[in-house]
Image (cartoon, helix red, strand yellow):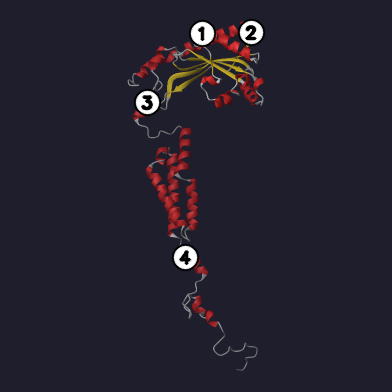
Amino acid sequence: MGGSEGAPPLPPAGGYAGAARARGGLDAAAGLPTASGVTYTDPATAAKQGVNGVGLTAISATVIFAVILLLLMLAGGTDALYGVTLLVLQLAIVGVIVAAMLTRRGRMLGAIALAVSLVCNVATVGAVGALYSSATQAYDGTKSEQQRHEEAYPGVKDYSPQDALSGPSLEGVQAEGDALMAAIRERLSDRYGYTWVQSGAVDVSPERNGYGGESMLRKYTSTVWTTEQPVQDDARKRQVMQAISEVLLERGMSYLYPLNEIDAGISPDMVAKLYGSTEPSRQHTWEYYGDTYPDPMRFYAYAYDLSNDPTGEFRTQREAIAAQTGEPLEGIQLVVFARRVLPDADRAEFEERLREYPGF
């Protein structure tokens, strides 16, 4: 016992109370069972355990699937993106992601895979692919030869090409429309002293053929003529429309028909939305219509009246239009439309191409 000065006292007989909990020493540190039967695990050792297989499968499958989708999109395979095979694969991958997120060690990889899947999936990549293909005109889809043949049809679906050949040409409609509006302007100027402003430009554009392509038939819109003088009195508006009807009847056209009144067959809500009110006396716009049925020419007469615009919203619309076309903000306006008319220069080609479509 010599030289033991300052050493801690010896433990009592049987040891200190509760000392068995700490027994194990180096055995516990080594991960071996202690005398109490409890195995100690080092946290550093637990952190070194392998990556969860389900999580690794989920993230790998998701990345590969996203790459496949992007490659198909860039290649213009928009239809393939919505194929049954890719949809089934998408559902299978979603199942693997869910399984990974249900495991403790695979939850992190499952969450990453889910985020990637939300960005790159059949729906989003397919929509972007359709826009990309449309912008680059690369979308050819899975059209058959029959569909491509129909797409080149020179006429219009459910419209007899013989009606287009026997009816007035584009040039004939334009000449007839110009003559009609000249006669109307002369009548109204003589009777009411109106002067006129011409605005806009003639617009000729192709009709759609109903099979996904463009027809050789054309849509025609004339220039616009508007009075320089406002017409705000209801009685005068009706007199003007009556005078226009007289000219139409003299030229073999129909009587001018009001579209802004409820009797026209439009619902009251739509009448109020289009013309400002269901009551003509409170409407900012009157719209009258006449035609040459069964010929294609259509004539419209409008009366714009800013005095019936309590909110100023209609004035704002008219000012925007006037800034583009130069037409007056209000007054009587005349315009001619025509649908499905054939230019004289295209007549021979139209007849030649029709021979390829005997059953149309």
Label 2 secondary element: helix
- Alpha-carbon span between mark 4 and mark 1: 94 Å
Decide: is 185 above or below 90.
above
Residue 174 in percent (x, y) is at 50, 12
* Lower position in the chain sequence, tag 4 or tag 3: 4
Q: Which mark is residue 150?
A: 3
- Badge 1 crowding class, 10 Å Cα cut-off, few under 14, some 14 to 19, many 20 or more, is few
Label 3 secondary element: helix
Asked if the residues shown at circle 4 and circle 2 are in contact, with their CB atoms under 8 angstroms apart, the answer is no
Label 4 secondary element: loop
Asked if the residues shown at circle 2 and circle 3 are in contact, with their CB atoms under 8 angstroms apart, the answer is no
Of residue 308 and residue 216, the one placed in the foreground of this image is: 308
- Alpha-carbon span between mark 2 and mark 3: 53 Å
* Lower position in the chain sequence, tag 4 or tag 2: 4
Decide: is 92 above or below 287.
below
Residue at numbered disc 2: 192
Q: Residue at left 43%, top 49%? A: 64
Residue 245 in percent (x, y) is at 54, 10
Of residue 335 and residue 262, the one placed in the foreground of this image is: 262
Label 1 secondary element: helix
